[in-house]
């Protein structure tokens, strides 16, 4: 399969490391030194046992004409989805599928401005990947990739199965979900509970569970998300929701959340698409979400303080 990955960061590189040995993969990124480094030395994956493996992958600057692809995987931060798609319209032919495994809400809407909904695949990744400098990343946690059609019909389900087979061939563990909404909410409440807290505390993902003060805060954040999810039509038992978040804390214990990596690189975060979405929906449904609201405010304050950090 001809596959283009938008964003050669932590997750784009991780998925490229699985896909490139089997498929025709190109990474597209807006940061020239990253593209040059990948072309010169490949991408190096560091596993939990510290073993390092280097993979050879083609990389080009975003916007370069590499022709029509079978599949485009979007792995830029949510705030860059629209611009990354717009820069790379040349990748899209009448049969091209576009898949987003990004965190937060709204990426499918940005993609739908350029691609018919039936050709968009949405999903979640349970992997954790931490950027370790140009062309290097630490793969701290593994887990399934859950995918489903953005718009369910016979044709879109057939396409999802095709993509699932291509990912599985590369060693990824894939679940196909006809109704992906619950899985998307599940990931949103995980990100709401972990990302902003670990960014503000500058701690590893595992510490959100092992530190009793942080776990207490995390529970309050997640309970607000559960109420908003239910009002939005997706029910979670509170214990079930906490169990899901706890599992991620344990599975990715040694890793760092993508938002914390944004803080380290002084980049604008995805907060408005994560806790900000829950806070906004809470307002729409008349549900108070003070913890999520506070996190949104604190993360924006942190972003404004970057010049002093
Ligand atoms: N890291 C993780 O463990 C996980 C992350 N995710 C989600 O995956 C997505 C990607 O995250 P992650 O890999 O951590 O992010 P990174 O910031 O590591 O990677 C994103 C890359 O995209 C590049 N980029 C920005 N704009 C463009 C553009 N217009 N065209 C092409 N490339 C562009 C960035 O360059 P520059 O740095 O110059 O902006 C950066 O290299 C996010 O939605 C995140 O929430 C999901 C699960 C786990
Ligand atoms: C679940 C978690 C925290 C782990 O990778 C994540 O999705 C992220 O870092 O954004």
Image (tube, helix red, strand yellow):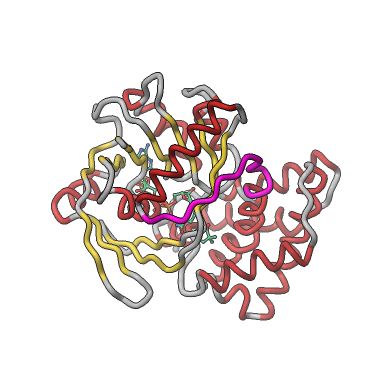
Answer with left or right where residue 16 lies relative to residue 120. left
Residue 280 drawn above or below residue 95:
below
Q: Can residue 157 be spotted in the picture?
A: yes
For the image, the number of numbered tags is: 0
Q: Which residues are magenta?
A: 171-183
- Locate the C terminus by quadrant: bottom left
Which residue is at 60% across, 29% downward?
151
Q: Quadrant of residue 281?
A: top right
> Residue 205 magenta-drawn?
no
Q: Quadrant of residue 248?
A: bottom right
Which residue is at 64% across, 65% downward?
245
Which residue is at 47% across, 60% downward?
127
Q: Quadrant of residue 136?
A: bottom left
Image location (x, y in percent) of residue 237: 80, 60
Considering every residue shown, the one lying at the far right of the view is: 286
> Residue 176 magenta-drawn?
yes
Q: Who is closer to the viewer here, 221 or 96?
A: 96
Image location (x, y in percent) of residue 247: 61, 69
Q: Who is closer to the viewer here, 17 or 37?
A: 17
- Locate the N terminus by quadrant: top left
Considering every residue shown, the one lying at the far top of the view is: 94
Q: Can residue 202 be spotted in the picture?
A: no
Image location (x, y in percent) of residue 37: 19, 52
Answer with left or right where residue 242 lies relative to residue 85. right
Residue 103 drawn above or below residue 249:
above
Residue 241 drawn above or below residue 84:
below
């Amino acid at each position: 399969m001809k596959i283009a990955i938008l964003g050669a960061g932590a997750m784009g590189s991780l998925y490229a490391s699985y896909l490139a040995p089997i498929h025709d993969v190109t990474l597209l990124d807006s940061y020239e030194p990253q593209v040059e480094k990948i072309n010169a030395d490949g991408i190096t994956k560091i596993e939990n046992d510290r073993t390092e493996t280097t993979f050879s992958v083609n990389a080009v600057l975003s916007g370069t004409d590499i022709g029509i692809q079978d599949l485009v995987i979007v792995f830029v931060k949510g705030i860059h989805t629209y611009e990354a798609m717009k820069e790379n319209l040349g990748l899209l032919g009448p049969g091209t599928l576009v898949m987003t495994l990004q965190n937060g809400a709204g990426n499918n809407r940005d993609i739908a401005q350029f691609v018919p909904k039936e050709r968009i695949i949405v999903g979640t990744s349970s992997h954790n990947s931490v950027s370790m400098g140009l062309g290097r990343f630490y793969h701290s946690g593994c887990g399934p990739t859950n995918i489903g059609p953005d718009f369910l019909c016979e044709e879109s389900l057939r396409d999802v199965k095709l993509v699932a087979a291509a990912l599985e061939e590369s060693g990824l563990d894939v679940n196909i979900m006809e109704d992906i909404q619950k899985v998307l909410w599940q990931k949103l409440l995980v990100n709401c509970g972990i990302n902003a807290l670990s960014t503000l505390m500058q701690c590893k993902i595992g510490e959100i569970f092992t530190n009793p003060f942080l776990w207490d805060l995390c529970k309050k954040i997640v309970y607000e998300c559960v109420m908003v999810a239910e009002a939005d039509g997706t029910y979670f038992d509170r214990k079930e929701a906490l169990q899901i978040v706890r599992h991620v804390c344990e599975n990715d214990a040694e890793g760092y959340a993508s938002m914390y990596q944004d803080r380290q690189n002084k980049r604008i975060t995805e907060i408005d698409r994560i806790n900000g979405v829950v806070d906004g929906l809470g307002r729409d449904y008349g549900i108070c979400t003070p913890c999520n609201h506070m996190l949104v405010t604190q993360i924006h304050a942190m972003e404004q303080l970057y010049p002093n950090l």
